[in-house]
Amino acid sequence: MYVVVVYDTAAERNPMILKTCRRYLHHVQRSVFEGSLSAAQYRRFKTAVETAIDPSHDSVLIYTYPPGTAPHRESWGIEQPAPSTIL
């Protein structure tokens, strides 16, 4: 499935969320990530994020798209570099 993640967390938790997102997805903008994940990768990612956040303060939005589909993305302003391959 294709996944887009947007997060807004407290400053002390930002490094942990950033590291977790970089492990699974492509960094698109400051707190925005996207990429394809298998069902197992998605479950591991979701568990890691849920463990790292404080649900009473932090916000994480995850948009999922069915396998074989991806959102159409348009960009205005300064174009960010293309996502690099995750190893």
Image (cartoon, helix red, strand yellow):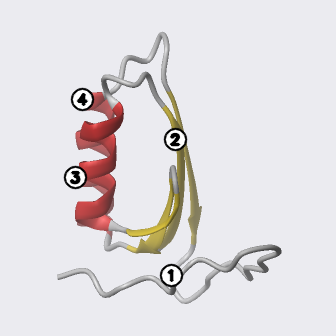
**What separation in Å lies between label 3 and label 1 (alpha carbons)?**
18 Å
Identify residue for label 2.
7
Mark closest to the chain's N terminus, 1 or 4: 4
Q: Amino acid at mark 2?
A: Tyr
Q: Amino acid at mark 1?
A: Pro
x and y percentages locating residue 84 in the rendered image:
36, 85
- Looking at the rendered image, the quarter that the C terminus falls into is bottom left
| Earlier-in-chain disc, 2 versus 3 | 2
Residue 9 lies, in percent from the top left, at: 46, 28
User: Regarding mark 3 in the picture, which secondary structure is present there?
Assistant: helix
SS under mark 4? helix
Q: Which residue is mark 1?
A: 67
What crowding class fits label 4: few (fewer than 14 Cα within 10 Å), some (14-19), or many (20 or more)? few
Per the image, the residue denoted by label 3 is 44
Q: Residue 33 — which label?
A: none
Residue 63 horizontal/vertical position (percent):
60, 57
Task: Read off the residue under disc 4.
Answer: 51
Calculate the distance from the C-alpha at mark 4 to the C-alpha at mark 3. Answer: 11 Å
* Circles 1, 2 touching at the beta carbon (< 8 Å): no
